[in-house]
Image (cartoon, coloured by chain):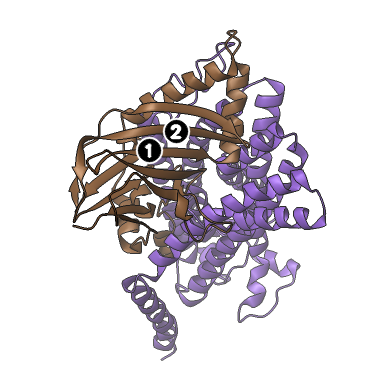
Chain colours: A purple, B brown
Amino acid sequence: MPGLRTTLRFLVPLAMLIAAGGVGYALGWWQQVAVQIVFWQGEFYHALVEAVSALKHAPDVTTWGVLLGVSFGYGVFHAAGPGHGKVVLSTYLASQGGAWRRALGLSALAALLQGVMAIAIIGVLVFGLGWLTRQAMGSIDQAELASFAIVTLVGLWLCIRSLRRLWQSCHTASNPAATTTTPAFTPVATSPVSSHSPLGPMVPSQRHTHDAHCGCGHDHHIDPRQAGDWCVALLTVLSIGIRPCSGAVLLLGAASLLDQFGKGVVAVLAMSLGTALTVSSLALLSVLARDWVKRHLKPAKGGGHWQSWVGLAGGALILVLGLSLTLAQWQRGPAAGPPMLGAPTAQQSDPTPGPFGAGRG
Amino acid sequence: MGLLLGTSPAALAHPHGWVDMSVEGVFDDQGNLTALRQRWRMDPFYSQVVMEEMATVKDGTSMAQRLDALGVEIRNNLATQHNLTNITLDGQPVAQGEVTDTNTDYRDDRLVYEFVLPLSTPQRLAGHTLSYRIFDPTYYIEMVHEANEDGSQPLPDALKLDHPPAGCTTRIVKATPDPQKVMEAAMLDKGDSGEPNLGRFFAETGEIACPG
């Protein structure tokens, strides 16, 4: 029975994966890893500060190398920490389709944008507008709110798109001509990653073999939807990249105060590379997981519907995440700064701002 | 996908700066512990950022006066949070008095804040162990005792005693956070700021013990 065998081929590895995950969870491995990452972040931050001072006193190949290495490592582990960005990106990739190349591109772009935003915050607010570094760091709060709002927008957009596709495919399905031709669901027909599929490599021209059935829910490279597709992809990138890491902003601010702004910029870009490595690994993982599920859970009929339902679920998840983050941030108000100094004033409304006047909370 | 999502949103905070601290247990003539004298050295980056702010004040005050004002500000901010210090005697909480003798200074590219934290009543330590933990609950700032070059071992000078009775000893115990509790706290235990209260898990413990 081929049906049973296919089901088993899917269920057995899935069961093993879940079992492995369950055992790992029960043994507390992932908690240990998470706590270890927190320790490492602290150590990397120490090393980063020392590297900047060392480079200031003795700028040579060694100190440059240390700064770049430490910045890169900080980026890697920092990205392994908390963050809605990775949830949004992996949900987006897992539910919306797209090739591994796109996954890599989007995550690299998002990581780079984070670095550029940090540079822009110091460059524009501190150099341009004369804000204090601490005030500029306070502006990360607004960037964060913007980020959450964009996440909501991405979720909303994806939901609407999936609903529209479902509606369209319902109408197409009622047309007999559309249902009797090619199989409704070809594994990952949209993406070069399908070269890993049992069907063997696909040359680009083959991707468009079912252009006649544009209601089937696939992304097509020549589809007019493509523009909107890229738009939402870039919006996803923006939602992740618009909020810079406060560590990066602090590094740049302190570096510029030490007349080392250029070195700070180089360090932040190295940090972005590290972040890109972590985020793109995660992105790749979600693309691989998605394709694996797709290959093994090939529905006999209604494949287009299945794809759209997954898309809708992903969009809804992102929408809920975006809404809850936005609301939580709204209710919380500005984030508290370090305990000794109270919250920084976000804008320089006063030429001599009462620096530590704003108490905490 | 479910697996990926399940593991992602664990919101673990992490420090964005640190304080190197040294503590001195102050004893009176009767051999009772009266106070913890503390010195906090803010990390170089944060010190830079604060000094930038100090430099922009244009009210004709001298830098020494501004640093004094900063010290008052810090003291007032910390007063609302038990000075980030948690003291116990044989596991029982010990009440604090009001901070005195604050001093703020800028030395070797570091902002240094010194103060004396009195115990509300002097404690007789003979046969007892007094423990303290100094930490930022939100773990925005990592508070560590002054340590050696690579940060692996606290320096002996990081916890000293001033006029102790004979035989009193000190010890600094590094944090060994229980990963499971940290993760539980990361997900459930949110402080006023909305940040998880993780600092306590990563706090070092200083101990002062005197023979009975």
On the rendered image, what quadrant is the N terminus of chain A found in? bottom left
| Marked residue chain, label 1 | B
Dot 1, crowdedness within 10 Å: few (<14), some or many (≥20)? many
| Image position, residue B82 (x, y; %) | 29, 35
Secondary structure at badge 1 equals strand
Q: Residue at x 41, y 27 (%)?
A: B102
On the rendered image, what quadrant is the C terminus of chain A found in? top left
| Image position, residue A329 (x, y; %) | 40, 34
User: Can residue B195 be seen in the rendering of this structure?
Assistant: yes
| Image position, residue B174 (x, y; %) | 39, 59
Precedes in sequence: disc 2 or disc 1: 1
Q: Residue furthest bottom?
A: A1
Left or right: where A25 falls relative to B49: left
Left or right: where B138 falls relative to A350: left
Whether B200 is drawn above or below A36: the answer is above
Q: Looking at the rendering, which quadrant does residue B192 occupy?
A: top left
Dot 2, crowdedness within 10 Å: few (<14), some or many (≥20)? many
Tell me how far mark 2 sits from mark 1, CA to CA: 8 Å
Identify which amino acid the numbered label 1 is placed on.
Answer: Arg
Q: Residue at x 71, y 42 (%)?
A: A264
- Residue picked out by circle 1: B37
Secondary structure at badge 2 equals strand
- Residue picked out by circle 2: B114
Towards the viewer: A64 or B174:
B174
